[in-house]
Image (cartoon, grey):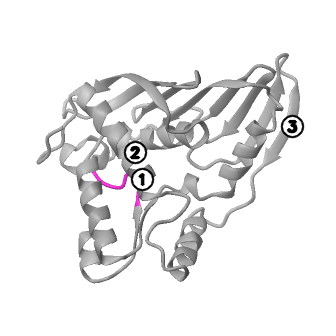
């Protein structure tokens, strides 16, 4: 990213944006000083599914929502990038970032408290983590991610009149609403996509046309907010990458 900015090139950077918030702040300061577009490419922020999910849960079909759960686990322990600290390995930055974004996209940033725990590998990165977020308005979120086993990848909103299940939080395919007796109320399949990347690319193109340096779907402030949460979680777990202090 620094090399691109040095040469005046806009940047669309895959999640997680950097290893930590300090590095993110450095990149964003540089982008702002040079007036160059930089945005984080966490595709779920840009996909049409985001708006459909938000509208569905806001419709009141499952009543007053007070909790969301989300999980993302893959059996990918053999992939070197997952276990090497020098590659910013661990479940959190690779998988848990989707869970955090899922909760915060729909419940907001007004957080009262975060509690968490993690199991670490022999190399000192998290192979499994569990995160509980308490929001100031009384809502809660339960999030888990890991790279030693496979999960169903569901995101579930819990309401006073029922619940809503989102299939696959890191590439959502549908949302189904049920009442308190598990009777299906509504099912929505999300639009077919070519690769999923097209939405973030199109938004970058529009943002460049408008001569802006950040995309509305993932502002600089939101990127920093997520990075700071992940810094605080890693600090709790004692996961520190080479050449950094938390």
Q: Would residue 150 be counted in the magenta stretch?
A: no
For the residues bearing labels 2 and 3, Cβ distance under 8 angstroms: no
- Mark nearest the camera among 2 and 3 is 2
Task: Give the number of the disc on residue 221.
Answer: 1
Task: Give the number of the disc on residue 84.
Answer: none
Specify whether 44 is left or right of 162: left
Span highlighted in magenta in the image: 14-19
Q: Would residue 15 be counted in the magenta stretch?
A: yes
Specify whether 133 is left or right of 129: right
Q: Position of residue 71 (x, y in %)?
A: 53, 32
- Find the residue positioned furthest to the left: 243
Residue drawn at (78%, 49%) of the image: 189
Residue drawn at (43%, 71%) of the image: 213
Q: Position of residue 88 (x, y in %)?
A: 25, 47
Q: Position of residue 1 (x, y in %)?
A: 29, 69
Q: Quadrant of the C terminus?
A: top left
Decide: few, some or many residues near mark 1? Use Cα within 10 Å; few <14, some 14-19, many ≥20: few
Rendered position, 202 above or below 29: below
Residue 188 appears in the rendering: yes
Q: Which residue is mark 2?
A: 225
Residue 126 appears in the rendering: no
Q: Which residue is mark 3?
A: 186
Residue drawn at (37%, 50%) of the image: 224
Query: Marks 1 and 3, Cα distance to the nearest angstrom?
Result: 34 Å
Decide: few, some or many residues near mark 3? Use Cα within 10 Å; few <14, some 14-19, many ≥20: few
Mark earlier in primary sequence (2, 3): 3
Residue drawn at (26%, 41%) of the image: 83
Q: Quadrant of residue 157?
A: top right
């Amino acid at each position: 990213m620094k090399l691109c900015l040095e040469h005046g090139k806009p940047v669309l950077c895959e999640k997680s944006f950097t290893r930590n918030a300090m590095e993110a702040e450095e990149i964003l300061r540089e982008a702002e000083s040079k007036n160059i577009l930089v945005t984080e490419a966490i595709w779920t922020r840009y996909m049409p599914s985001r708006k459909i999910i938000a509208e569905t849960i806001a419709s009141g079909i499952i009543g007053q929502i007070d909790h969301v759960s989300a999980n993302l686990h893959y059996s990918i322990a053999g992939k070197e990038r997952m276990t090497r600290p020098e590659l910013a390995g661990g479940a959190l930055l690779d998988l848990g970032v989707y869970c955090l974004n899922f909760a915060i996209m729909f419940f907001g940033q007004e957080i009262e408290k975060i509690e968490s725990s993690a199991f670490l590998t022999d190399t000192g990165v998290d192979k499994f983590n569990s995160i509980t977020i308490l929001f100031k308005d009384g809502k809660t979120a339960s999030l888990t991610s890991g790279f030693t086993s496979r999960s169903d990848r569901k995101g579930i909103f819990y309401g006073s009149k029922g619940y809503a299940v989102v299939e696959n939080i890191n590439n959502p395919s549908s949302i189904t609403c049920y009442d308190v007796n598990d009777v299906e109320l509504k099912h929505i399949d999300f639009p077919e996509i070519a690769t999923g990347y097209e939405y973030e690319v199109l938004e970058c193109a529009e943002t460049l046309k408008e001569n802006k340096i950040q995309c509305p779907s993932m502002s600089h402030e939101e990127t920093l907010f997520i990075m700071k949460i992940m810094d605080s979680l890693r600090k709790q777990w004692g996961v520190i990458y080479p050449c950094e202090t938390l």
